[in-house]
Image: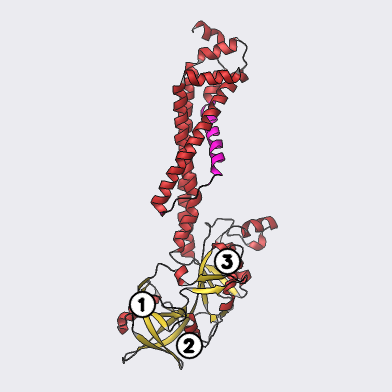
Amino acid sequence: MFFRIVSESFTRKPRRKVLTAVALTLGMAVATATLEVALDVGDRLAREFRSLGANLLVTPASDTLPLEIGGVDYRPVDAGAYLPADDLGKLKTIFWRNNVMGFAPFLDVPVTIAPTGAHEKTREEMIGTWYSHSVTVPDGSTFTTGISATDPWWRVDGRWFSDAAEEGVAGVALAQGLNLHPGSKVNIDAGGRSHTLTITGIVSTGGREDNSILAPLEIAQDLAGRPGEYRRLLVSALTKPADSFSERDPATMTPVEYDRWYCSPYISSISHQIQQQLPGVEVRAIRQVAEGEGRILTRVSGLMWIVTIAALFAAALAVGATSATTVLERRSEIGLMKALGASRRAVGAFFVTEQLFLALVGGVLGYALGIILARAVGVGIFGVAPALRWILLPIVLVLAAVVALLGSLLPLGRASRVDPAPVLRGD
């Protein structure tokens, strides 16, 4: 009898039910789309940010005080501490190894640069690094990294050097001063050691690289007399925005707090793990990059949650309006049920069952429509559709049920208080 009464309420007066289902469908569609994008936007934006440069700087912990003027290190090549390049494969063994998108070691060497066949020469910095270098990981696998991974936005007229060749890339300002172009040859001299490099491209970064020559790390190591060593390392890692918990000192944390911090991809926890794998280093976040990313990610995520809450609130208002109208239209039916002995709980159960059924229909349809909206938004913004997350379906169904019940809470209370006597008299 109970389910017969509920089913007949849908067949006799379907218009209000359809309006309620449509309101729930639209609300759940917007909620599904924003939740899909919100869960995906952090990783997507983080990957986009990683194309703008590294966010971690690794240097020797015992390095001497640097002497830099205008971004150029004027220390003698044998001053300061160095780190072994053979240990860099260990970066892919940390807990958050899959978040390490790339890294590039650097060794700066003051050199004399002279174009072959020309009389002019200049003393500038040569920056030794990797462009696309294969690193052996302790587990036997290989990982290809270099500035192709940490700084893909650098513009090159020509091509990058090969890490195994006597080649180099000239900064745009240096190339203009020495009239260099792709195909030019230059003699590089540093304290009696020399190499002849073929210029394969002209690079423009807007930084100190514009006045330098970039060459394979092995050439810089030979010129500096530091085989297998480097002075600084840039690491590009996917991280989550920093919060007050991430800034705490790990030494003051309880074991539970430490595990939570260590297992979260904070820039501080990844830095800590790098220091554990590379003893004798100091890892610092590049604050301008990290803080800018954190602010943008926090604001975008906050905007998504605001849109989700607004959509759910609007759906609840629509459900409340249609439920109130339904209760007014069915006052005589409610009065008759009470006159025949139905309790307040039984009357409320009828309406709750109707709302839950509508929530199920609206939730399923809203989830399907929301997936389509999320794919359209993802392709429009990032060029890639967000991953399909089936775990959101039960969440959306629960949200639909909560919205339907909260929206109809006041009308249901009014229905349970209907007095059958005046209703049946027509008052």
- Marks 1/2 in contact by CB < 8 Å: the verdict is no
**Mark 1 lies on residue:** 201
In the shown orientation, is residue 186 left or right of residue 143? left
**Distance CA(mark 3)–CA(mark 2):** 31 Å
> Residue 393, relative to residue 227: is it above or below?
above
Q: Nearer the viewer, mark 1 or mark 2?
A: 1
Compare marks 1 and 2 and give the one earlier in the sequence. Answer: 1
Q: Could you say where residue 168 lies in the image, as x and y percent from the top left? A: 40, 81
Residue 384 in the magenta stretch? The answer is yes
Residue 223, labelled with which disc?
2
Residue 271, labelled with which disc?
3
Determine crowd level at label 2: few under 14, some 14-19, many 20+ residues with C-alpha closer than 10 A: many
SS at circle 1 = strand
Q: Could you say where residue 169 lies in the image, as x and y percent from the top left? A: 39, 79
Q: Could you say where residue 167 lies in the image, as x and y percent from the top left? A: 41, 82
Is residue 306 at all visible to an observer of this figure? no
Residue under the image location 51 percent in, 5 percent down: 425
Image: magenta residue range: 383-409
SS at circle 3 = helix
**Quadrant into which the N terminus falls:** top right
